[in-house]
Amino acid sequence: MTVLGVLETEPGGGAADASLRALAVAGALAASAGEDLAAAWFGPVGAVDRGGLAAAGVARGWAIGPDELSGYAPLAWARALAGLASAGSSGSAAGPPGGGGPVSAVVAAATDHGNEVLAHLGAITGLPMAANCVSATRTGPGECRLVRQRWAGSLLEDAVLEAPLALLTVATDAVEAPAAGGQDDGRSAAAGIGVERYEPELADGDLLVRAVESQQRRSGVSLASARVVVGGGRGVGGPEGFAALEELAGLLGAAVGVSRVVTSEGDPAHGRLPGRQDDRGDQHRRRSPDRRQGRLRGHRGPARGDPRAARGPTRAPGVTRRPGGGRLEEQAHHLGRVGQCPNCSGCVLAMPRQS
Amino acid sequence: MEICVCVKRVPMVGGSIAVTADGLDVDVTMSGFTVSPHEECAVEEAVQITERLGGGAGGPRGGGVTVLTLGPPEAAGQLRDMLALGASRGVLLQTDGAEWGSVATAAAIAAAVRDGGYELLLFGNEAADTGGYQVPVRVAHLLGLPCLTGIKRLEVGAEDGGGPRRIVAAREYRGAEEVFEVALPAVVSVKEGINLPRYPSLPGRLRAKRAVIETIEPSEPSFAPDGLRKERLRVPAGSGKRAQVLGSGTDAVPALVGLLDELGILS
């Protein structure tokens, strides 16, 4: 049997960091059942460093084509994975080309792409999908024990997934990337990795939804992929207070994230909220700067009972580091507790991830 | 233009969430209920679209925004909240309050909207509580419609000589903007930030209070296990950690630099 990790690739080549973290969970799942770990990606055979995959415990890989699939097309990607996972299972039970046996699980990073593609795969196969897992262990044929995040990581759920093909996405900010082996180990292992081209059969409808255009952000670091986030909230005092945070972020190669109060008041330049409902993505909420400034300087947010009052805590200026340990929103929450104290307005706060 | 927005009743929680003694649910003893922010934005987007395009054109009900939820009778309160924001019709797929899985939820929603004449089905990108990320996609498959998820910008085109409207939708992904274009009808899930939801007006609240919520039985009359079984919920370890105040102003700089170095941020 084989656990199949789905990799997203970076524009410049190589597997995305989130995918490598998901691969760590996939590897643990495979190890718990004595199964092989394999990887698949969309693009050319050379799009991923095979030595790095070998160091992560990957035994074989599939580069999924044709070229039409290089651009993001969620349904087509899912159809390809369904074909790859089911190849051989009804006949010789030999599994996909290249060996390793039938696929018992498909694991992807819980990114927008990963969640979307595996949701399509779940719909195609009629199987359940578990999102935002932080660990997975095989407990029997067709049964996995999972720990997954709920409430954006504020709670953990212990769950059992019963399905002939487990479909999992991994909350990648909660797990470490697999430790890379030494360079020599990687090279020797790479020599043993077989990477095959897999070309699925697609229907016209499978390519109905595809990214027709992808514009790169002009500059700066994306909050979604930033290694370091410099956070600011009401304690910053006003729009002008973000200049120092921007400067610090620039020096650190970081992104600036803001609290919900700042986000809700709509400063386009500082509209990026790490944490709760934004699934670690960016937010842009727009309102006039005057109102935003007024809110920062006096108002406490929506009235009690208003649906918007439930949007989470206020956060004071802080520095959080990701990935590598705890949850960003958890840290921000505790920063927020301090930030709500009038005496702490303007303080420099920090919450190390593991302290 | 007929638009249906699917929302979910979820507990209104703060920064920390308490779990019931049996570990199976969120303790809502001291909290109210709301809908996910993503879904509130979906309702706002639907209302804005009908305001732009004139919601009265076409559709079996003369156009407008239908808000639909699957949940207990109390979920009618969340439907009224959304009606106060400008939706014109509320539909409750009434359950006994048990937590439905994504597969069963999608099946019930698809059955309820299949013959509704909706051009656009809007969802929040994921439910605030379960974070399943899959109901919109499963509904789209069941209805044979294209599906776009995680959308942060949505433009609905005008009717084009009897042909279907087209939508252009975009989202941010890993520092880039992905743009999609499909013909309606379609399923779209949006993320918070696509718009700024309005506060309900007093007339809107009064209208919502008087509105009749249509209550129907889901096609699947009882909870259907999906294969994903919750055993318990728990608060992650380390949730009680507190922040460390390093100092104020320039006096904090040495400690801050030391900490950044310790974290490996300066390397």
Image: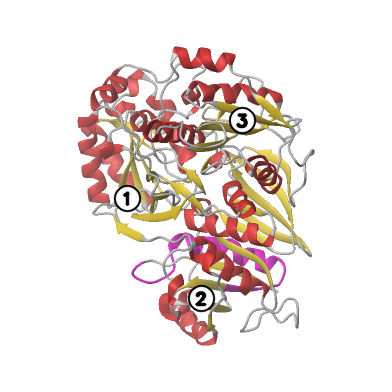
Mark 1 and mark 3 lie on one chain; the one further toward the N terminus is 3
Q: Image quarter for residue A169?
A: bottom right
SS category of the residue bearing label 3: strand
Question: Are the residues tagged 2 and 3 within 8 Å (C-beta)?
Answer: no
- Residue at the disc numbered 1: B261
When the figure is inspected, residue A190 is found, relative to residue A215, above or below; the finding is below
**Residue A278 percent coordinates (x, y):** 45, 41
Residue numbers of the magenta segment: A11-38
Q: Residue at x 52, y 58 (%)?
A: A114
Whole-percent x and y of residue B251?
23, 32
The residue that appears at 50% across and 33% down in the rendered structure is B63
Q: Residue flagged by tag 1: what amino acid is it?
A: Asp
**Contact, mark 1 vs mark 3 (Cβ under 8 Å):** no
Which residue type does callout 2 highlight?
Answer: Ile
Residue A165 image offset from top left, x and y in percent: 70, 64
Number of marks present in the image shown: 3
Label 3 sits on residue: B9
- B187 and A269: which is toward the camera: B187
Nearest the viewer among A240 and B194 is: B194
Q: CA distance from mark 2 to mark 3?
A: 40 Å
Chain hosting mark 2: A
At horizontal 61% and vertical 74% (from top left) the residue drawn is A84
Q: Considering the image in quadrants, where does the N terminus of chain A appear? A: bottom right
Q: Mark 2 and mark 1, same subunit?
A: no
Q: Is residue A3 magenta?
A: no
Q: Residues within 10 Å of mark 3 (few under 14, many from 20)?
A: many
Per the image, the residue denoted by label 2 is: A64
The residue at 47%/77% (across/down) is A66
Q: From the viewer's perspective, is residue A341 above or below residue B110?
A: above
